[in-house]
Image: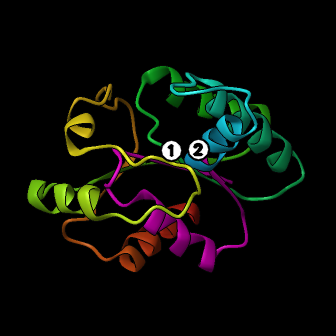
Amino acid sequence: MLIVLGGLPGSGKTTIAREIAALLPCTYLRIDTIEQALRSAGVAAGEIGPAGYVVAYGLARSNLSLGQAVLADCVNPLPVTREAWRAVAADASSPIVEVEIVCSDTAEHRRRVEQRSIDIPGLVPPAWESVQRHDYEPWSGPHLVIDTASLSAREAAQIVLSHTRN
């Protein structure tokens, strides 16, 4: 099972991912962690393009082939990234649950972005203005949408997990 959480920074992806990981034994892949590790290793600096995603796709494919559930936490902003996750699942003959995390309350979303604490050493959090300008294309095709303006992280995690049983 591959669960992919996507959405803009500050929408609640990581908070929900932590709840899911507490309830479901899985390999947790967080793109922010992978990208910062690449920067810290001197492999990349600043904007690193698709490198973090490519690493995550490989790790997901390997873990899925071992029969492990995989939880991916990423912005997943473009049709090409979404299709790549689907290809990973298909390569491993694994079901996939695609989830878009949104926060429909703009004031709450802004508060989260501006007040978030960073738990990855060296990571610079995005400013609200950059979140608003983020290259993020609308999703097409079937996927689950979770609005964190009206749900707790635990409730959201339980909804996502209920879709893994279908």
Residue 27 on the magenta segment = yes
User: Is 26 drawn above or below residue 92 in the view shown?
Assistant: below
Quarter of the figure that contains the C terminus: bottom right
- The answer to whether 53 appears left or right of 78 in the picture is right
User: Is 23 drawn above or below residue 137 in the view shown?
Assistant: below
- The answer to whether 99 appears left or right of 2 in the picture is left
- The answer to whether 123 appears left or right of 60 in the picture is left
Dot 1: element: loop
Front-most of residues 105 and 94: 105
Residue 100 on the magenta segment = no
Q: Which mark identifies residue 48?
A: none
Q: Residue at x 19, y 37 (%)?
A: 129
Q: Residue at x 34, y 43 (%)?
A: 126
Q: Which mark identifies residue 31?
A: 2
Q: Which colour style is shown?
A: rainbow
Distance of label 1 from label 2 (alpha carbons)? 5 Å
User: Is 28 drawn above or below residue 150 in the view shown?
Assistant: above
**Position in image of residue 57 (x %, y %):** 70, 35
Front-most of residues 145 and 95: 145
For disc 1, the marked residue is: 74
Tell me which segment is drawn in magenta. 1-30
Amino acid at the residue labelled 2: Ile
Q: Residue at x 69, y 43 (%)?
A: 37
Q: Is the residue under label 2 in contact with that under label 1 (CB below 8 Å)?
A: yes
Amino acid at the residue labelled 1: Cys
**Position in image of residue 52 (x %, y %):** 64, 33
Q: Residues within 10 Å of mark 2 (few under 14, many from 20)?
A: many
Quarter of the figure that contains the N terminus: bottom right
